[in-house]
Amino acid sequence: MTRSSAPNPRRRIPPVARLLAAPGGVALTARYRRERVVDTLRLVLGELRRQASDGGPVPPDEALLAAAARRLESASRPRLTRVVNATGVVLHTNLGRAPLADEAIAALVSAAGGATNLELDLGTGRRGERDDLVVEDLSALTGAE
């Protein structure tokens, strides 16, 4: 049995290390975690390996890095977007939660912006229960004891 004299087209695919060392690779690792860049480059090169077995051309390193950059950028964008609820259903389960009042949003932003006494009893300085902050309000609202 003889081997084909044609070179393996996959050998033209650059190694991940070479792409990481290129200026575009350095820029990607400065913006994203290195592990994430490596995983994305491996995906791009894996697709290229499948195409290269058909004898297709291997794009330049810059094009491969640009493909990885597009994937990383796309994966970094928020996936949730505001939509208009024109279904006629006031609380539609496929459209997330009920909108919050402006005051509730402001309270969330304030609490999320720093440390809070979520499980701290300010009177004693000891660990408290998070329910302690709302138990009186819930009792008043529901009439429970």
Image (spheres, grey):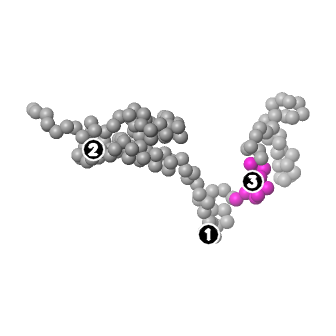
Report crowding for label 2: few under 14, some 14 to 19, many 20 or more residues within 10 A (C-alpha).
some
Please give the residue where the numbered disc 1 appears in the rendered image.
86
Q: Earlier in the sequence, mark 1 or mark 3?
A: 1
Amino acid type at circle 3 is Ile
Report crowding for label 3: few under 14, some 14 to 19, many 20 or more residues within 10 A (C-alpha).
few
- Decide if residue 54 is on the left or right side of residue 63: left
- Decide if residue 22 is on the left or right side of residue 115: left
Amino acid type at circle 1 is Ala
Closest to the observer: 106 or 130? Answer: 106
Distance from Cα at disc 1 to Cα at disc 3: 23 Å
The reply to whether residue 129 is visible in this rendering is no
Residue displayed at 39% across by 32% down = 17
Residue displayed at 77% across by 47% down = 110
Label 2 secondary element: helix
**Outermost residue to the front:** 23
User: Residue 4 at x, y = what percent?
Assistant: 14, 37
User: Residue 1 at x, y = what percent?
Assistant: 9, 32
Q: Which residues are magenta?
A: 99-109
Label number found at residue 105: 3
